[in-house]
Amino acid sequence: MKHIPNFITCLNLAAGFISLVFAVNGDVVTASWLIIAAMIFDWFDGFSARLLKAYSDIGKELDSLADAVSFGIAPALIMYHFLGSSLSLTWPMITNASGAGDKLILFSPVIMCVCAVLRLAVFNTDESQVKSFKGLPTPANALAVISLVIAAHYSDRIVFKNILESTPVLLMLTVALSLLMVSRIPLISLKIANLKLKGNEGRYLLIILVAAAFVFLGIGAITLIIPFYLIVSIISPLFR
């Protein structure tokens, strides 16, 4: 029983790797859904560890290694795909890039990989992040990226496709998400110890905002989850 959480973590890692395979082959929609699968496994490994009281140092390190692949490297490769497409490059993009400028743009998602690993390393050694976070969690980074992919594919709103076709916007998004991961901005944890309103005001507000967005905007509302999360985290101290 004690190995169940680590097995689920390995499923997270497997989903992340398969996501990389699909992203490399240009199927970023399937790659995005596999990252969502990795997020589900990431939640279940923590849940099962708490339920079974199966905590271990190996499990903690394994979880971070899996997260680095699924929520750091995989979304960065998706950004690489769209940056190359915005430059009208075909695979292999780095080979077909004509100048140093294009190659520099293509390599920019490496910032996301590095910052994701740094964020995970800091999280593992920072005891102040047990009940809250400092900096954007890596799964939130991945969700910010894949939400655009899913919205562009399933929504009829052209704005999402325009974002994914704009090199400057993609560059700004890559840098912004990377810096948020290594920032010290206090953000709320979504782990709920109880269902009482007191102490959970920010979490309930986030749920209400996201639910309302999906009612009025449909699938495109998925792109608002992380912005809402950041806003609610910033205003949460007002509820105390």
Image (cartoon, rainbow, N blue to C red):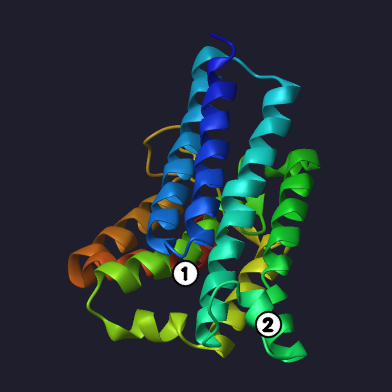
* Residue at horizontal 68 percent and vertical 82 percent from the top: 105
Residue 14 in sight from this viewpoint: yes
Q: Nearer the viewer, residue 184 or 33?
A: 33
Q: Is residue 117 left or right of residue 218?
A: right
Q: Are marks 1 and 2 in contact (CB under 8 Å)?
A: no
Give me the C-alpha separation between circle 1 and circle 2: 25 Å
> Which residue is painted at 63% across and 48% down in the image?
69
Q: Tell me the kind of residue under disc 1.
A: Pro
Nearer-the-camera pick, 42 or 192: 42
Nearest the viewer among 56 and 201 is 56
Numbered mark located on residue 227 in the image: 1
Q: Earlier in the sequence, mark 1 or mark 2?
A: 2
As shown in the figure, which amino acid type bears the numbered disc 2?
Answer: Ile
Q: Residue furthest top?
A: 1
Q: Residues within 10 Å of mark 1 (few under 14, many from 20)?
A: few
Which mark's residue is nearer the viewer, 1 or 2? 2
Q: Looking at the image, is 205 positioned above or below residue 220?
A: above
Q: Is residue 192 left or right of residue 117?
A: left
Q: Which mark is residue 71?
A: none
Mark 1 residue element: helix
In the picture of the structure, the residue carrying the numbered disc 2 is 105
Residue 127: x, y in percent?
76, 38
Determine whether the residue tagged by mark 2 lies in a helix, strand or loop. helix
| Residue at the limit of the structure toward the left, as seen here | 215
State left or right for residue 220 relative to residue 30: left
Quarter residue 205 falls in:
bottom left
